[in-house]
Structures are given as structure tokens and as C-alpha cells.
Image (spheres, grey):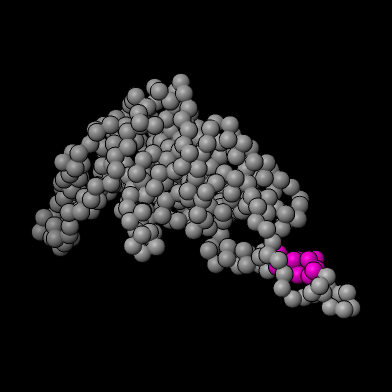
């Protein structure tokens, strides 16, 4: 994956990294984006001046800081949108009614730009594979086609705004290479500073991104995807709720081998998808409190089932031969 351009985080220049990772080259600098921001500020000032340069609104506007950039290096969506117009590219909000009415499968798109709390990053398709090009990661992260929809749903659950890239992206070396070959990734890249943060405090101190995913060869990825698809298909049938949840969890675990499931958002989205297929114009939301309640109820049922069906060894059983309600064996996670 050395051919993939991946700019890593410097200061708060994530907008610059996001654009360059999308375009696969050093196309924009902080000076370029600052120039666009100043141009937008001047256009806004001229519009405000039309109401009278002596008006209270105009004086208030002049006293306010720029809404398009700040001293830390943050740039607004307007700056990013204007920068992309130079390349004939446009942005469309992923969960907008206009886009949802198109009923396009995410894997058929070319790229996405994501934003949360002033952090921007790119998800792009190169060749026939998807990559998370977050500048907070030490390198590109491979995303399977099946997991892409779950990843986007997880980001939305976490509060990210997602924009679809419309138009033809410029040609790049990585696109040419990955059109004729597929890459493998045995272990996902770490977050920048993750080792140091875990060593010093044991707590991940940077914004959350995709759960850890390990990929082997193409056959292994395909097997994991097939397991997930089969579990999703089973969960849409009229089967017992406990079996449905267990099948889906096992499938997700197969597709995310080695994952540390510290964030339950992706599982919540997967459970929602399995219990009720979503139409293009309708999406069901599930609060974190409701998710915790359902998970607790599920594990309570599992524990009750274990207590009723797993007898103690003969040496520890009461003389009457009845089942003991004492210590039970925890159900085995698969």
C-alpha cells in the first residue's frame, strides 16, 4: 500500500490532509486554504455592507471572528467545498433527502468526507477496495465492501456529518496500481500516539475512529464478508431473538478479528439493520440507553438459561438429585 498517498496529522490542519488524501497528492497548502477563506470572508462582508455600512448588523459582523477559518488551522465546509470546485467536484450530504432518494449503494460511490467536532477525514475507493485515509491513523486502513455500510452507520451514530463526493477524481498512481491488483492488510494501522497514550494512562485520548479490523488474504476477507451476509440474511427471517443476536454477533466478530469492541455503535447499527431492513427514505434510530437496556436484557436471559439447564457435577449436587441454582458456567462467546 506504499503507492497510496496518506498525509498524517500536523497541528489542526485536518482539512488540508482530508483534501490531499482525497485527491491523492499535495495539492493544497494552508496558504491556499487561507486564501479561499479570506475570499469567502470578503464576499460575506460585501453582502452585509449592502444593508448599510453604518448599520448595527454590519458593525457586529466586522467584530466577529471569521467563520471560515481560525488561528488553529481549522477550515469550514465552505472552504472545502470551494477548494473541490477547482477540480469539478461537489459535496452532497449523505443523509439528505436528495441523496437518499437516489437509493445508491455506498460501495458504488467514489469517496466520502467526514466531519465531527472540527475534524475532517476522507474515505476513498482506490481500484476496487475502500480505504479509511484518516490523518489520525499511522497509515491507510483497508475497509471491506460489507463493512463500509456499517462503518458509515457507526460514524453517523457517533455524530459525524458525512458528505458524498460527486464528480471525477483526478487520476493517481494508487488508482492505476489497485485497478490491476488487490492489497492485503494483516493488521489495521494504529492511531497516531496510541501506543504512548496506552502506556501512560491506559486510555485512548484521541477521537474514536473505526473499530479495529484485521484482514488476511482475499479469500479470508471474502469468507468474513460471506459469514456476515449469511448472518444478516438469517436475522431477517422469523427466528428466535436470542439466536438472531448471537448469529449476528458471531458474524461481526469474524469480520472484525482482533477488534477491541470499546464502542458499541457499530454493533447497535448492525442489530438495527438485522431486525428491520431500512428503506431509502426511512432510518430507525436507537438511543444508547435503549441499546444498553436490550443488551442487558439479552445477557440476563442468557444467564437465566444457563442456570436452568447446566447442572452441577455429581459430587456437588444435592442428595435429592435436583438441579442446583448455585454457581453456573458462563456461556461461551464464539
Whether residue 42 appears in magenta in the rendering, the answer is no
54 left or right, relative to 109: left
Figure quadrant of residue 63: bottom left
Q: Quadrant of the N terminus?
A: top left
Question: Measuring 35% from the left and 28% from the top, which residue is drawn there?
Answer: 3
Q: Looking at the image, which residue sits at the far bottom?
A: 319
Q: Is residue 9 above or below residue 220?
A: below
Figure quadrant of residue 15: top left
Residue nearest the observer in this picture, 203 or 301:
203
Question: Measuring 76% from the left and 50% from the top, which residue is drawn there?
Answer: 238
Residue nearest the observer in this picture, 294 or 332:
332
Percent across and percent down for residue 240 are 76, 55
245 left or right, relative to 152: right
243 left or right, relative to 150: right
Percent across and percent down for residue 227 are 64, 41
Q: Looking at the image, which residue sits at the far right?
A: 320
The residues colored magenta run 302-313
Q: Is residue 303 above or below residue 185?
A: below
Question: Measuring 69% from the left and 61% from the top, which residue is drawn there?
Answer: 331
Q: Looking at the image, which residue sits at the far front?
A: 315
Q: Is residue 70 above or below residue 165?
A: below
Percent across and percent down for residue 269 are 56, 52
Question: Measuring 83% from the left and 70% from the top, which residue is drawn there?
Answer: 314
Q: Is residue 232 visible?
A: yes
Q: Is residue 241 above or below residue 43?
A: below
Q: Is residue 97 visible?
A: no
Percent across and percent down for residue 334 are 65, 52
Magenta segment's dominant SS is: helix
Residue nearest the observer in this picture, 193 or 123:
193
Could you tell me how many numbered marks the image carries? 0
Amino acid at each position: 500500500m506504499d503507492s497510496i498517498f496518506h498525509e498524517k496529522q500536523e497541528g489542526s490542519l485536518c482539512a488540508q490532509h482530508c483534501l490531499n488524501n482525497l485527491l491523492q497528492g499535495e495539492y493544497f497548502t494552508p496558504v491556499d486554504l487561507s486564501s479561499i477563506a479570506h475570499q469567502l470572508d470578503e464576499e460575506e462582508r460585501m453582502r452585509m455592507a449592502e444593508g448599510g455600512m453604518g448599520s448595527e448588523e454590519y458593525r457586529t459582523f466586522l467584530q466577529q471572528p471569521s467563520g471560515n477559518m481560525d488561528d488553529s488551522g481549522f477550515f469550514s465546509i465552505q472552504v472545502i467545498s470551494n477548494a473541490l470546485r477547482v477540480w469539478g467536484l461537489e459535496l452532497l450530504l449523505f443523509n439528505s433527502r436528495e441523496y437518499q432518494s437516489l437509493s445508491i449503494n455506498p460501495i458504488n460511490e467514489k469517496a466520502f468526507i467526514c466531519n465531527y467536532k472540527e475534524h475532517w477525514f476522507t474515505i476513498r475507493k482506490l481500484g476496487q477496495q475502500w480505504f479509511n485515509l484518516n490523518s489520525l491513523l499511522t497509515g491507510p486502513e483497508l475497509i471491506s465492501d460489507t463493512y463500509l455500510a456499517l462503518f458509515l452507520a457507526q460514524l453517523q451514530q457517533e455524530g459525524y456529518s458525512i458528505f458524498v463526493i460527486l464528480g471525477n477524481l483526478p487520476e493517481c498512481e494508487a488508482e492505476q496500481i489497485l485497478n490491476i491488483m488487490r492489497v492485503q492488510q494483516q493488521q489495521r494501522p494504529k492511531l497516531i500516539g496510541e501506543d504512548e497514550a496506552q502506556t501512560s494512562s491506559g486510555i485512548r485520548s484521541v477521537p474514536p475512529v473505526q473499530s479495529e479490523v484485521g484482514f488476511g488474504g482475499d479469500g479470508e476477507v471474502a469468507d468474513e464478508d460471506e459469514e456476515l451476509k449469511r448472518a444478516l440474511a438469517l436475522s431477517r427471517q422469523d427466528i428466535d431473538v436470542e439466536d438472531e443476536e448471537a448469529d449476528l454477533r458471531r458474524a461481526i466478530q469474524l469480520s472484525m478479528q482482533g477488534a477491541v469492541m470499546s464502542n458499541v455503535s457499530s454493533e447497535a447499527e448492525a442489530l438495527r439493520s438485522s431486525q428491520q431492513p431500512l428503506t431509502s427514505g426511512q432510518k430507525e434510530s436507537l438511543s444508547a440507553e435503549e441499546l444498553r437496556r436490550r443488551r442487558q436484557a439479552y445477557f440476563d436471559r442468557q444467564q437465566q438459561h444457563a442456570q436452568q439447564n447446566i447442572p452441577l457435577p455429581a459430587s456437588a449436587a444435592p442428595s435429592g438429585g435436583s438441579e442446583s441454582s448455585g454457581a453456573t458456567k458462563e456461556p461461551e462467546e464464539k
